[in-house]
Image (cartoon, rainbow, N blue to C red):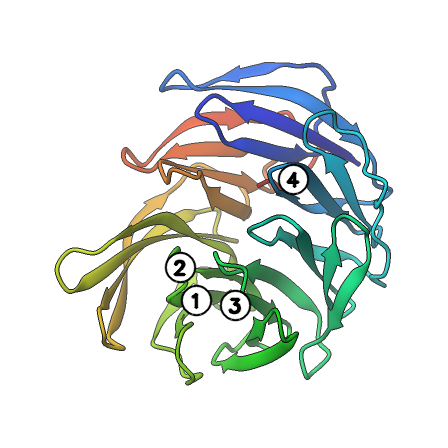
Amino acid sequence: MFVSRYRVVHGKDLDLRYSNDMSDRRVRGSDSIVASNIHTITAHEGDVTAVAFSNTVLATCSSDKTVRLWSNTDFLELPSSPLLGHKYLIHCCEFSPLGFTLATCSQDGTLRIWDIKTGDCVLCASHPSKCAIRVCRFSSDGAKLVTGGDDETACLWNVAEKRIIRSFKGHDESVTSAAFSPDDSYIVSCSSGGDLGGDMLVWDASFGHGKFLTRVHDCHDLGVTCCSFSPRCGMPDSLKKYLIATCGNDNLVKLWNLVAEVGSINVTVKLETMLPGHKDSVLWLCFSPDGNHIASCSLDKTMRLWNVMTQQAIISIDEHLRQGSFQ
């Protein structure tokens, strides 16, 4: 399958798979934003399920059970690539903040952490239930990692000690996505929802208890596929304020305000707005590093870029044979 790298002029690179055009075509949107395909990689023998960037390396993972590593400058495959060990399709990949290691998780029920330089697997671990693991995310300092799986549980790991330090139970379906707040104080996890709407749960990432602080029921019809915190965090007076984006099988992107009282377990989450536009399930989203934009991709074969302030789509790329994944 193809991995195509698009450059967006505000500085965020988006990697979109399944591009059917090998040329450096440009897509122009509002706000004078231009997206152009600067390189396409033909690599995996199966679907490319996720990608991740460090400062120097692009990682791609696939249903062909492999992880491949590429130079971020000339797009040549690194000597340590491919990373072999997973027995089934890989759902997610995530670089540690310093970029020296890569976490991956798979339908085979394992979380793996890899040394990027050598290609060695330095950790192979599972949830106690041995279930499929669908998401893995590092904290901003790299000391912790959260995973979510088909056992309806999110697990918090101590990376240095290579062990689970807390299990978060409260979902009624598979945990499909999770994210740390930008200050690592909170974790949000979201579930698939089955025939109902997926739930969003907020957890305390700092202290020892495993009870959720608040729950949002049915935040997307038929389940949540991805969640992401804005990198911005406001602290007016005695409150912490965060912005969360979610997407789901209802074709929507939604923005939520999380407000927490400093020094308290009192947390509230309220819907700010819904961003319609996609014509099919929205599979993935992420904030730009400055928090000004959100990128989303969908089963409708498009990627959209949204202005957070105006809450409008400012660019749409629809050059894919199938759905996309990006970071």
Cα distance in 3D space between marks 4 and 3 = 21 Å
Q: Which badge, 1 or 3, is on the more N-terminal residue?
A: 1
Q: Nearer the viewer, mark 2 or mark 3?
A: 2
| Residue at image mark 3 | 193
Residue ranking furthest to the left: 237
Cα distance in 3D space between marks 1 and 3 = 19 Å
Q: Nearer the viewer, mark 4 or mark 1?
A: 1
Residue found 79% across the figure and 61% down from its top: 121
Left or right side of 36 for 9: left
| Residue at image mark 1 | 187
Q: Which badge, 1 or 2, is on the more N-terminal residue?
A: 2
Residue 312 x, y percent position in the rendering = 34, 32
Quadrant containing the N terminus is top right
Closer-to-camera residue (84/21): 84
Closer-to-camera residue (125/297): 125
**Which amino acid is tagged 3?**
Gly
Does dot 2 land on a helix, a strand or a loop?
A: loop
Cα distance in 3D space between marks 2 and 3 = 23 Å
| Above or below for 149 versus 249 | below
**Which amino acid is tagged 1?**
Ile
Q: Nearer the viewer, mark 2 or mark 4?
A: 2
| Above or below for 305 versus 285 | above
| Residue at image mark 2 | 181
| Residue at image mark 4 | 323
Q: Which mark is residue 56?
A: none
Does dot 1 land on a helix, a strand or a loop?
A: strand
**Which amino acid is tagged 2?**
Ser
